[in-house]
Amino acid sequence: MTRLRALGRFILALLRELADENAYHRHLAAHGCAHSGEEWRKFSEQRLRARYQRAKCC
Amino acid sequence: MSLTTSAPAAASSGLKKILGHLLWAVVALAAAFCLGAIALNRGEHINSTWLVLAAACTYALGFRFYAKFIAARVMSLNNQRATPAERLENGHDFEPTNKWILFGHHFAAIAGPGPLVGPVLAAQFGYLPGTLWIIVGAVLGGAVQDFVILFASMRRDGKSLGQMAREEIGKLGGFVALLTVLLIMIILLAVVALVVVNALAGSPWGAFTIAVTMPIAVFMGLYLRYWRPGRVLECSAIGFLLVIAAIFGGQWVAQSAAWAPVFTLSALALAFAIIVYGFLASALPVWLLLAPRDYLSTFVKLGVIFLLAVGIIFVRPELELPAFTRFTDGNGPIFAGKIFPFCFITIACGAISGFHALISSGTTPKMIAKEWHAWPVGYGSMLLESFVAVMAMIAACVMHPGVYFAVNSPAGIVGATPAAAVATISSWGFPVSVAEMQSLARAVGEQTLFHRTGGAPSLALGMAHIFARSGGGQGLIGFWYHFAIMFEALFILTIIDAGTRVGRFMLQDLLGHVHPALGRTSWMPGVLATSSAVVLAWGYFLYQGVRDPLGGINSLWPLFGIANQLLATIALCVATTILIKMYRARYIWITGLPLVWLVTVTFAASWQKIFSPVPRIGFLAQADQLEAALRSGTVATANIAPTQTLIFNARLDAVICAVFLVLVGVILIDSVRVWTGILRGTRTSQVAEAPFVLSHLAAEEV
């Protein structure tokens, strides 16, 4: 049961990483600010600009 | 006292060691037995479990012994050395990340349509050549390339492949790498767009489903930006449910007398629609269409790959295609050419892919917490990607060979009518009937399954077959077929829109040296001009593929394969240079052997694609044959202009192939010059690694 829970936690963490939600929380922590629509838009724009300047794999 | 307590501990440790050795001996025997079974089996159907076990055991051995040897002896990974993620942590790009999360992240980034489509096309030789290349190529080539480039980038503060080529080989190397990537992007975008076009042409169900994903993506974009900012998982779950609803909606549309004709589009109409879409996606704000589709596509991709793995293990289907088909002689209907070199360029991403080097020198090296994490992330992720390719091979080979060839063969080869197609395919020794094809088409809700080239429809058929047998029965095969088509089209379109944008940035980067304003990403005329240039470039090749009587895949897929493998050649040149500079010259066979193999394969394939006297293989021979037909007056007046276009296209493809060869030849000669200089002592051996900094990050913190 503990292992199943650990697996569940890992999958959720992976999904959050892929969804940039973890990166957003790191961004909030690094800049000492609280979540808001404006802050998300600021973070998202920086993140996406960097992401789509790199080639996507075939 | 310590002696009495340590004796049992030592005995226990010795026992563990023996058991470990025994376990690996069993794995090695199992790998040899399974590989032998699939290699030596003739005349009988083989169960897919043999392929799964052969792959899994070989990967385990490669990971445990070969990769660990490279990590410890060659690269001397050191967990005491702080990685860029620790030294340069900034909460954005540089962030120490748990190794398994990073493994998933890296795998999601390298997994594209290549490992799915390539094996399906290469199955025309039979299951054996492609499967062996996928397994051996990944263990000795692809995973090594990804691992060494990841290591090199990690030791250089996350520098890109182009930057490393410039610093380690020379300025010329860096420029050539950038230009090669731009050219490869253009061919890649054209070929994957062609795969989507061929999958959706004449399919109202598929066309409707994919069309609806665009408003769904816009809805998700608005949802994320204004209504529930930051809730990406929640938004993607809603998007996924809407896409599933769209698949059911597509079934209704296909059965509707009023709506079916609206969504029954020709290949040409679809090609233009995708070209317009590519332009819009490149010029529109990224949050509106591209990003939400990308999030959704990533989750769907991982979910489907997982489902396919479970399905194959659960169903254990038998392979209907033989180990070798008669098309090893080079006369295959899907693409022309013999196993060597064409099998090895058709399957690129599942065995070795140059594009992975761009990912391994992109985000991933900036997120590695400990140097030893590069072992599972760099080497292990590629093994998983290779396993995806094995699954695609299985999905292609579970179909009856006659059905496989009827779906994948272009009208120009097997005949335009169903009767002509089944007669040709049956005469090859792969019996199939019109009734069988019609029944299958009805079952999956399509008007016809003949001439559906490109690999995506046959992969979807194979996947639907496996999914339907896993649960839901044959009644749901239509849903599963369109689910698989949706999955393939969704992430191919993500590559098209993201790739067009990336191509635009690269072009702006290059043109910025000529006219600074063109390099500014905020200058709208520059954005529009460069977006148009990139879209027109790949759009032209897409148009060429759609109009090609041989189906387009015959010319474009080998071109893409050659380009991708040439990029791998550049990556391996960089990797070999770095090993020599690290005084590891005695280990250069690790990157040198795959490099020699790739140079042999890609140069042989390029040479044949340009100069082969067989018109279906050689571009110049094809142009000459068409020109002779024009001169002899056997071409109908209405076909003169299209034939002239075909002649131009064949010569253009020959020139593109030659340009690739020259570019890679330049970087190869430049690299050899550097290597010999260092080995002879006429050149200094200076690595551009970041200096050693002691790590303070505890393993348990990540």
Image: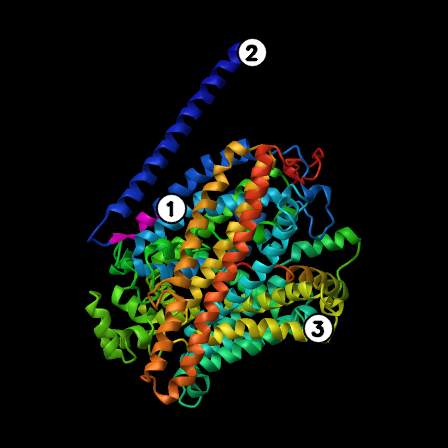
Chain at numbered mark 2: B
The magenta region covers B46-52
Is residue B83 in the magenta section? no
Q: Label 2 belongs to which residue?
A: B2
Chain at numbered mark 1: B
Where is residue B33, by image quadrant? top left
Question: Does B610 appear above or below B443?
Answer: above
Q: On the rendered structure, is A21 left or right of B30?
A: right
Q: In the structure shown, which secondary structural element does the residue marked by tag 2 occupy?
A: helix
Marks 2/1: CA distance? 46 Å
x%, y% of residue B40?
24, 46
x%, y% of residue B498?
59, 66
x%, y% of residue B513?
72, 63
Marks 3/2: CA distance? 76 Å
Q: Label 3 belongs to which residue?
A: B526
Q: Nearer the viewer, residue B163 or B649?
A: B649
Q: Label 1 belongs to which residue?
A: B55
Q: Pick whichever of labels 3 and 2 is earlier in the sequence.
A: 2
Mark 2 vs mark 1: same chain? yes
